[in-house]
Amino acid sequence: MDQRGQTVPIWVSEDGIGKLSSDDIQGLWYLKGRRHTTHSPMPMYVTNRGYGLLLNTPYYSSFDMCAEDENAVRIESWENKLDVTLFYGPDPATTIEKMTAAVGRPALPPPFAFAPWLDAIYGSQNVRAVAQALRDNDIPASVIWTEDWRGGAKDGLGYTLSENWEVDRNLYPDFEQVASDLHDEGYKFFTYNNTFLDSTEPIYQEAVKGGYTIKDNAGKPYVFSGVKFHDTSMADLSNPDAVAWVKKKYKQGLDLGADGYMADYGEWLPTDAKLASGESAEARHNLYPVDFQRLDKELFDAMHKADGVDRLFFVRSAYVGSQPLVSVVWGGDQQTDFSDGDGLPSVIPIGIGLGVTGFPYFGSDIAGYMSQGTQPSTKELFYRWAELGAFSPVMRTHHGKSAQANWNWEKDAATIVLFKRYAKLHIQLFPYLDGLAKQASDKGTPMMRPLAYNYPDFSPGWSMTDEYMLGDRLIVAPVVKQGATKRDVQLPGGTFYPLEGGNPTTIPDGGGTTSVAAPLDQIPVFVPAGSVLVLLPDTIDTLVAANPATGTVTLSDVKDDRVLWLYPGGGSDWTEAGGLSYSWQAAGLTAAPSSATWNGQSVPTMSGTIDVTGPGKLVLDGGKATLDVKGGAADRALSIVVR
């Protein structure tokens, strides 16, 4: 979050395994993580002095953030010019709006982006079993993603993927039927792709024959030691013929029934390669992810125009120019532990940084991915990561490198209960998340954001890495320390309520700290007084269509029905992306209401939930609080809870 005193290199790179405290290269560059190595570096920053800065260069750059001189930032660009744009807010929201207008913003993703995504591997039978187990346990999900659709094999307690580019008919002999079955149950079906060309796989010879690889000085395929330590090349995305070929290969999986894929890697373009375009590979290295994402987006746009099917790809590498091309970004391969540099705690600053620089739709691998140098994920880690995932824009599981040893949602009955609870809460938050996404698409407003975005005068909000805001009315304080069952939460001045009810906490002007209990199955989340939070009913199973015969409850089934959580004190408005709106004014309400009317008719309050029908106006305690609900069907069901 706060880079003051650091010198930050900007270079698209493997982020490595673990994190050193410095940027010194030790060992293989792609294995050992350094302090600032990242898949998605952005040569841009926002300050508490009211301005933002963007360095316009495709080349390597470095930002000395008052490390040499406490009063000066020094910017170094390995290009024969210095092109800098300044954006003045002076508030962070306006600064970020101006910055994202300059670099571009992503489109609003389809609804299923904001329902839980579950991974399933090991072949057709197990993918079906996972999908059915979710429905049997009443766990909502809208995406099943299958990383080993191209092949994979157990390796000790781990799992190694094949680098071929086509469906593995041994693992997935009936891939098309799997896709159809998942669609019937209300799932989108995602797979996996990258641009590596492994010399041990048939795809390599096809690429060489077509002239689609990057080249060396002799005009031969440029070969390096790849992620499997095999001789490997990669697709030359400066070559229009290679781009067309990659699209054709990726389209094969989509034509078989897949609805999207992980577009992995993108960081490895060698700076001394020879490109078909004649451009410098050094200048294109940072832009290779942008070229990769443009390819994916063009493919998806063309297919959507032809068949109207909503599809989505998700990425980890990015550079300036990626913003309008991608939707979901995930934080890379964190370690399966609580380490500050590369474990669970690192997810929060990654998500905040991406949000501020124009990538609002963020998620992470629940329970991490890499176990090298640490242990497989534990039950405690899975719980804490699932809780954080539920309050991330995108909630997605991953089996991880140690797939057979890592803890997962099916390991025991208690974990199923925990995961079900938070998966339900995440999908219920869809009206809120979708509305935030609309703001992000329109104005570049981060979904996951630092507290300083909404409270710029709250000094800790500029540097905290263990708290964040999800939108403007959820302050999330995940437990990121192993063994902790309580934590201190720093809050700005004001009154805040626990998300799911309880006594409010009032903080004096300037901010303060409150200590809260956080047992293993709880994540502290606070809501500012006067907030209205709009949720879906807890009966929802998926945000995509399903075969009615399955009994799966879809978004179209719940229609305009909503659950409203209202918090006393002050007031706020909310408008869903689809236009349904809510205005809550509760400055006079200090306790649970004793009387209520809906459209002038008395309604009971004793149960704690006020059940009414249709749009209209709720009046509590003779006018101490009012709620105006506009839009939607006359028979829409509203369950209203005053927290």
Image: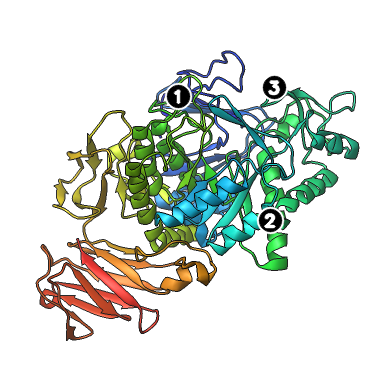
- Residue that badge 2 annotates: 176
Q: Residues within 10 Å of mark 3 (few under 14, many from 20)?
A: few
Residues at marks 3 and 1 touching, judged by CB atoms closer than 8 Å: no
Marking on residue 229: 3
Earlier in the chain: of badge 1 and badge 2, it is 1
Residue sitting farthest toward the top: 26
Query: Is residue 175 in view from this perspective?
Result: yes
Under mark 2, the amino acid is: Glu
Residue 394 in the image: x percent, y percent? 46, 49
In terms of depth relative to the viewer, which is nearer, 462 or 238?
238
At a point 78% along the width and 32% down the height, the residue shown is 201
Residue 324 in the image: x percent, y percent? 60, 52
**Color encoding of the figure:** rainbow
Above or below for 252 versus 194: below
Count of picture labels: 3
Q: Is residue 387 found left or right of 438 in the rendered image? A: left
Under mark 1, the amino acid is: Gln
In terms of depth relative to the viewer, which is nearer, 587 or 510?
587
At a point 54% along the width and 45% down the height, the residue shown is 120
Query: Is residue 90 in view from this perspective?
Result: no
Under mark 3, the amino acid is: Phe
In terms of depth relative to the viewer, which is nearer, 139 or 328?
139
Mark 1 vs mark 2, CA separation in Å = 51 Å
Dot 3: element? loop
Mark 3 vs mark 1, CA separation in Å = 33 Å
Q: Residues within 10 Å of mark 2 (few under 14, many from 20)?
A: some
Residue 59 in the image: x percent, y percent? 66, 32
Disc number lying in front (3 or 1):
3
Name the quadrant of the N terminus. Answer: top left
Mark 2 vs mark 3, CA separation in Å = 32 Å
- Residue that badge 1 annotates: 6
Dot 1: element? loop
